[in-house]
Amino acid sequence: MLDTIIEFTTCCRSYGLRVSTSEVLDSIRHLSLINPLDEKEFRTVLQSNYAKSRRDQSRFNSLYDLFFHGVKPVNSENTFTHLAGTFNKIMDIVEKNQDNNYVDIEPENQIDGVDNININSKKSSTATKTLIEFMRGRPSEFLNMIHKLNIMAVRQQKFFKSNMDQLSSKLGIMLSINQIRGKISQLIGTNFDNLDQESMKILNKHFNTILDNAYNLLTYEPRENNETLLEIKHRISNVENIGQRSFSSLSEIQIAEVMDVIELFARKLKDQASRRFSIKKRGNIDIKKTLRNSGKYQGVPLDIKFKDKPLNKSSLVVLCDISGSVWSSARFMLNVLYALQECFTQVRSFVFVAQLVEITNYFQNSDFSSNNSRNRLNRAIDSILNSNIINTSEHTDYGAALKTFKNRYQHILNHKTTVIIMGDGRSNYLNPQAHILGEIREKCRRVIWLNPEPHNTWSSGDSEIFAYKPHCHEIRTCMNLNHLTQFVRELVL
């Protein structure tokens, strides 16, 4: 039992599920309190220790089913005991007759903390070896290889970007699966080891089930459950007519009207926030200080002491896609946030098309409390677009932008940071690298995604919004003034 738990733990770690040594020891101790032969109780013990949140449960369930049921050796069932020898003989033949044309996947130099995958068809096939170990009931190496492919960093190329490294690696493994399947079918079809028809069907079904599981792991990228996600789709009518028009369809006159509404809204919101903060400066009663101070009044607490309660202001990190019609929404978003920057401890802004660039310093010299704050902010935004700090003609690449943020700026995140992403999630079919957003989520207070497209278009074309969705705390449509003002009000108050 101990060896089984350790091997299952290795599989979990190989596939990206974080399991500490103390959690393994707790599981072993808890198993002594139940009947391990009762699978319901056995599974509950492991799940309670290994899946630390609801987001981890889907990954745990898939790993549990795979390890204890998907790659179960033939001799683990009494009805299959007589086929165990034949099963092992077939696997030995397949292992000895590896085709040297199988792809080889092995870690090379690390790029930005992620193993780069090298494809080499001339060497002995690591992919095939790990696949054979997977079929023998030891899936950890195969899971580790698949996990590395799922989080594989895209090689940065100057003129041409694609996911060919990842796709070609997966294609090579797929070819290995098909070749092994064909070899096994050929062996069983030749009346191998004097098999009867029933035994041939049992073995063939068992091999196909294992290889199907390997294929599903290769083609399906796991995504965490996120039942706590706040998804807001409905329209909110705060401002008539102009408030319901999409940002991308506003004329110059209408833009000026929207800016007037934003300035009025920002002033009212700052007043509300300042009153709220002034009321909440005083915390709970400090019992120790109150009793100590009441000594001079013979124990009567005439002077109540309160604990100091600092203002609960959060810091903001804003990532704005400035490609196409998305930029029209991002522009208004930056106007509102910098008009309300005193309501936050810090606002740091980044823009991207493919490469991510910080633009916070463009706003630092602007006085947003003055009457011409709008002009100052617009001049700062125009200077960003007219400068050479970012190439707006590139194809949008959310994966590259997230990777740059992780490598250069992830240290600015803490438990008080709110990350806001303004974008449509359309990444031109390039690698979305959604796992990086998952790492960002682990380091900050919350991740909010504002999509300037209507909800019914999110799953169309090259949109990767549903790949990012499991890693967000909140996702909502933000395509007009009503959506934006409602969101900012909830963010501040």
Image (spheres, grey):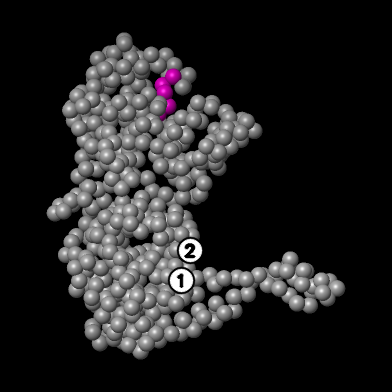
Residue under circle 1?
345
Label for residue 416?
2
Q: Position of residue 377 (x, y in %)?
A: 31, 80
Viewer-side residue, 146 vs 303:
303
Q: CA distance from mark 2 to mark 1?
A: 10 Å
Does 155 sit left or right of 16 as displayed? left
Q: Quadrant of residue 115?
A: top left
| Residue at image coords 21%, 35% | 119
Q: Position of residue 349 (x, y in %)?
A: 34, 68
| Residue at image coords 62%, 31% | 32
| Residue at image coords 33%, 45% | 113
User: Which is the main secondary structure of the residues drawn in magenta?
Assistant: loop
Viewer-side residue, 312 vs 48:
312
How dense is the environment of label 2, judged by Cα within 10 Å: few (below 14), some, or many (20 and up)?
some
Q: Is residue 418 visible?
A: yes
Q: Which residues are magenta?
A: 71-75
Q: Are marks 2 and 1 in contact (CB under 8 Å)?
A: yes
Q: Position of residue 353 (x, y in %)?
A: 24, 63
